[in-house]
Image (cartoon, grey):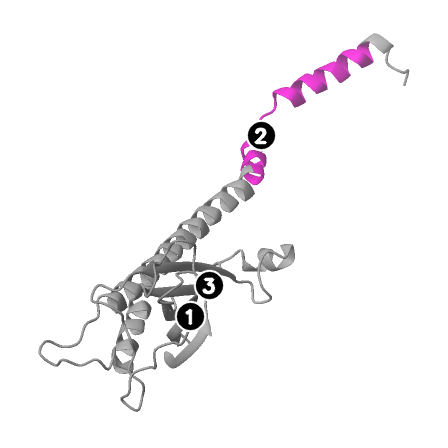
Amino acid sequence: MSPLPMNELLARVGGLLRRWQADSQGVAAVEFALIVPIMAITFIGAVELSQAITVDRRVSQVASSTADLVARWSPPSGSGSTMGIPQSEMTDITRVGGIIVSPYDRVPLKIVIRSVMSSPTDANNTKQWWSCTFNGLGSSLVCNCSNTSYALPPNLVTTLDNVVISETTYRYKPLVFDHFMKKMGTAGASGTYTLAETIYLKPRNGQVNMQQSDNTPCPTPTF
């Protein structure tokens, strides 16, 4: 069999190339395979971001609500009590935080409520009067009187002033991206990162003390 002339061979090769170029079979499958990973990442990212924003807003609401409830506290009408807010009420107030966070898990939630007082002569000399710490794990509350220095933002208080502080943190764990966060080193070993909010509020009804478990008020800080 004699070999094909060069011009005929080129003509056949050109024809094959034109048919291959015009053949659209499988194009949709290839395009789908290329775009699916992008669509999946976009969808998962949108879900992750919306949930993270929602939880972050809940954390801010927890800090605002708990600080406001403590700042609003006053003795029952007609009681004339100066003992301070009972720890049983502090327990109820901090449990509100767990309700606000729901339906998300309250175990990663931590609330620290502090009362800080300034010196009668120096507004920059401030001390923590008492504090209560709520841990979502076990819903436990620990309260203590204190007389320790605590720095406040400048110009927040005047002399012989009092401020209530609610520091709320939440160890947020993404639905899917926790594995990638650990690999990238952008989260803790458990694949979580911390959402936090701090709220400062002045008491509505004078200084807010706390009642100890033995029914005595916390001693006033010494300066």
Instruction: List the residue tagged with mark 1.
Output: 127
Q: Nearer the viewer, residue 118 or 59?
A: 118
Instruction: List the residue tagged with mark 2.
Output: 25
| Tag 3: amino acid | Ala
| Tag 2: amino acid | Gln
Q: CA distance from mark 2 to mark 3?
A: 71 Å
Q: Along the polypeptide, which appears first: circle 1 or circle 2? A: 2
Tell me if residue 98 can be seen: yes
Q: In which quadrant of the rendered view does residue 205 lie? A: bottom left
Residue 9, above or below 90:
above
Boundaries of the magenta span: 8-34
Report if residue 12 lies within the magenta region: yes
Q: Secondary structure at mark 1?
A: strand
**Neighbourhood count class around disc 2 (C-alpha, 10 Å): few under 14, some 14–19, many 20 upward:** few
Q: Nearer the viewer, residue 190 or 31?
A: 190
Mark 2 or 3: in front is 3
Residue 180: give x, y in percent of width and height: 59, 55
Q: Along the polypeptide, which appears first: circle 2 or circle 3? A: 2
Q: Secondary structure at mark 3?
A: loop
Q: Considering the whole magenta stretch, tell me its main secondary structure.
A: helix
Q: In which quadrant of the rendered view does residue 2 lie? A: top right
| Tag 1: amino acid | Lys
Q: Nearer the viewer, residue 53 or 206?
A: 206
Instruction: List the residue tagged with mark 3.
Output: 151
Residue 210: give x, y in percent of width and height: 30, 78
